[in-house]
């Protein structure tokens, strides 16, 4: 066994250990807390989770499928702008948009106050207005942030289809709507299901929005069980139920791709519009895109900027700089380590000769499917065991380790690496594909060993991919909330936890600058994705 194989398998085993501990712990004997939850409220948590997922993917389809079709196939005023602008809501954390719309639409908010003034209403008994802090409200808020996943993937799938198939359907007498449902959508079924699987996983992972709206889901159950009952076993069992949901989502996504082959593809992506909309249809398309963009991004950001201006003295505080620096430190450490580990694993995949060379990378990437609360429990299990062992070893000495691993920043950093390693792995692996194997043979013919080949040949060619991977991991670390809430040391805050605390206290205005900073940082990967797609299509 070569040293590269040992390194790759060590990384894979280390990063998959939390998941293994979580599965093992969830299969242990009965827990009184879990039994109590099972007999009382757990089924409500499960039903709410299912309804939340179904609602979000349904609303995402309603929003994203028409947007993807318009961007891929139609020419209308503003198309080039909306093509990339419709991805902007991804930069907006769901709990921020949830607070903003709650503030707008509550009884004391400006919308209902204006309605009462206009129509002379005096009390809630005089009129009906929907309550946003409900399951339905959570569905809308989460879908407004997550629909770009489906939009981006569906638009790309449509552009990779041959126009000849759509044109053939037109010759057979199908109008654009019929062609969409009978030709374009069935051909893109695999991509759509993959996007919906991703949206369902992100929906189940959401903690802040459902917690703020007081909607009990499995994610909040894990959080409450750990912090309320201090039962790690019960939290692990609930996490096991969530793993089952994740497994079903991935299984459905894999099944959708089975025997789903497109036999005719474009060499490059279609850039020309298939339909040129004019008159009322053109302006309806523009209006639809404008309304979605206004609701999902422009209005929340505008209100957030207004908060920052009105409450600048309170929001521009020393706390902002302290928490920003702490967030930056953790994000930089995680980015560097995740990229380094992914580089080692992908390099082994390249030079390995056995059939199992891709297994370490798959093991190491399992953490990305875990919601933040589940990941926190999964990480606590092995780290708590190690802390107990360390304290036993030093029991007869003057040194008292205490919670050296599970109670320090190390737990956060390790959890972030486990969760976001897959992002770095994917970016580095996609860059490695572009490097010709002949360069490896040329390097060996010049007497260079594998380490020299990696450092002198591969690394310079991978710099763009490595930078992309590091930036994407960095941004995700800055936005991560559930894992930070459960794993942060006492009196330690990141920007995400800082903003969430103010959101929970109905005082987002006092953390508006921190929230804006998170949004602005979140725009970086969207810019990277847009540029990479433009380069791919050109």
Image: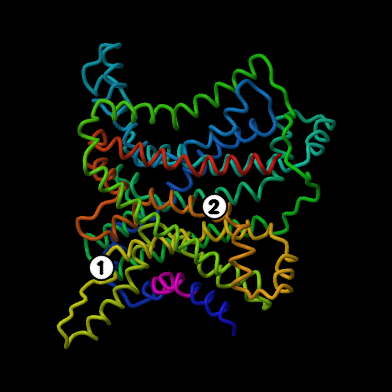
Res 512 seen here: yes
Q: Which residue is at a point 26% across and 19% down the rendered structure image? A: 113
- Identify the residue under disc 2: 197
Q: Position of residue 37 (x, y in %)?
A: 29, 62
Q: Is residue 90 left or right of residue 182?
A: left
Q: Position of residue 244 (x, y in %)?
A: 47, 63
Magenta region? 13-23
Rounded to the nearest angstrom, the CA distance separating label 1 from label 2 is 30 Å
Q: Which residue is at a point 21% across and 84% down the rendered structure image? A: 394
In this rendering, is residue 402 above or below 512? below
Res 44 seen here: no
Q: Is residue 368 left or right of residue 255?
A: left
Tag 1 and tag 2, C-beta contact below 8 Å = no
Q: Quadrant of the N terminus?
A: bottom right
Q: What element does badge 2 sit on? A: helix
Q: Residues within 10 Å of mark 1 (few under 14, many from 20)?
A: some
- Identify the residue under disc 1: 231
């Amino acid at each position: 066994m070569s040293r590269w194989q040992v390194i790759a398998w060590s990384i894979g085993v280390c990063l998959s250990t939390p998941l293994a501990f979580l599965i093992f712990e969830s299969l242990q004997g009965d827990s009184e807390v879990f039994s109590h939850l099972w007999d009382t409220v757990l089924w409500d948590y499960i039903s709410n989770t299912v309804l939340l997922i179904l609602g979000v993917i349904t609303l995402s389809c309603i929003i994203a499928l028409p947007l993807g079709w318009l961007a891929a196939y139609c020419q209308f005023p503003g198309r080039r702008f909306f093509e990339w602008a419709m991805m902007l809501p991804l930069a907006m954390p769901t709990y921020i948009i949830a607070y903003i719309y709650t503030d707008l639409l509550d009884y004391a908010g400006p919308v209902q106050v204006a309605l009462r003034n206009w129509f002379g209403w005096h009390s809630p008994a005089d009129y009906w207005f929907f309550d946003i802090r409900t399951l339905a409200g959570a569905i809308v808020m989460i879908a407004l942030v997550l629909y770009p996943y489906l939009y981006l993937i569906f638009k790309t799938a449509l552009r990779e289809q041959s126009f000849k198939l759509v044109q053939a359907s037109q010759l057979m007498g199908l109008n654009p709507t019929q062609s969409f449902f009978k030709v374009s959508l069935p051909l893109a079924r695999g991509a759509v299901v993959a996007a919906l699987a991703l949206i369902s996983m992100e929906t189940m992972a959401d903690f802040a929005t459902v917690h703020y709206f007081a909607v009990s889901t499995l994610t909040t159950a894990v959080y409450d069980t750990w912090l309320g009952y201090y039962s790690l076993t019960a939290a692990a069992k609930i996490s096991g139920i969530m793993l089952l949901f994740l497994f079903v989502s991935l299984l459905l996504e894999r099944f959708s791709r089975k025997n789903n082959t497109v036999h005719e593809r474009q060499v490059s992506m279609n850039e020309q519009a298939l339909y040129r909309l004019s008159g009322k249809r053109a302006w309806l398309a523009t209006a639809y895109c404008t309304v979605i963009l206004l609701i999902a991004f422009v209005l929340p950001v505008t209100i957030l900027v207004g908060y920052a201006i009105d409450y600048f003295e309170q929001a521009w505080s020393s706390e902002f700089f302290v928490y920003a620096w702490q967030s930056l430190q953790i994000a930089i450490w995680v980015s560097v380590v995740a990229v380094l580990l992914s580089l080692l694993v992908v390099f082994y995949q390249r030079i390995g000769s056995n059939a199992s060379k891709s297994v370490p990378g798959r093991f190491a990437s399992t953490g990305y499917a875990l919601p933040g609360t589940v990941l926190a429990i999964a990480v606590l299990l092995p780290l708590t065991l190690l802390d107990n062992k360390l304290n036993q070893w030093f029991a007869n000495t003057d040194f008292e380790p205490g919670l050296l691993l599970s109670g320090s920043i190390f737990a956060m950093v390790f959890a972030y690496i486990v969760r976001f390693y897959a992002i770095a792995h994917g970016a580095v692996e996609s860059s490695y594909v572009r490097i010709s194997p002949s360069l490896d043979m040329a390097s060996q013919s010049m007497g260079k060993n594998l380490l020299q080949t990696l450092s002198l040949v591969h690394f310079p060619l991978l710099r763009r991919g490595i930078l992309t991977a590091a930036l994407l991991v960095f941004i995700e670390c800055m936005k991560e909330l559930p894992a930070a809430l459960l794993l942060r040391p006492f009196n330690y805050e990141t920007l995400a936890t800082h903003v969430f605390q103010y959101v929970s206290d109905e005082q987002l205005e006092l953390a508006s600058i921190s929230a804006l900073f998170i949004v602005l940082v979140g725009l970086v990967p969207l810019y990277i994705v847009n540029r990479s797609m433009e380069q791919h299509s050109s």
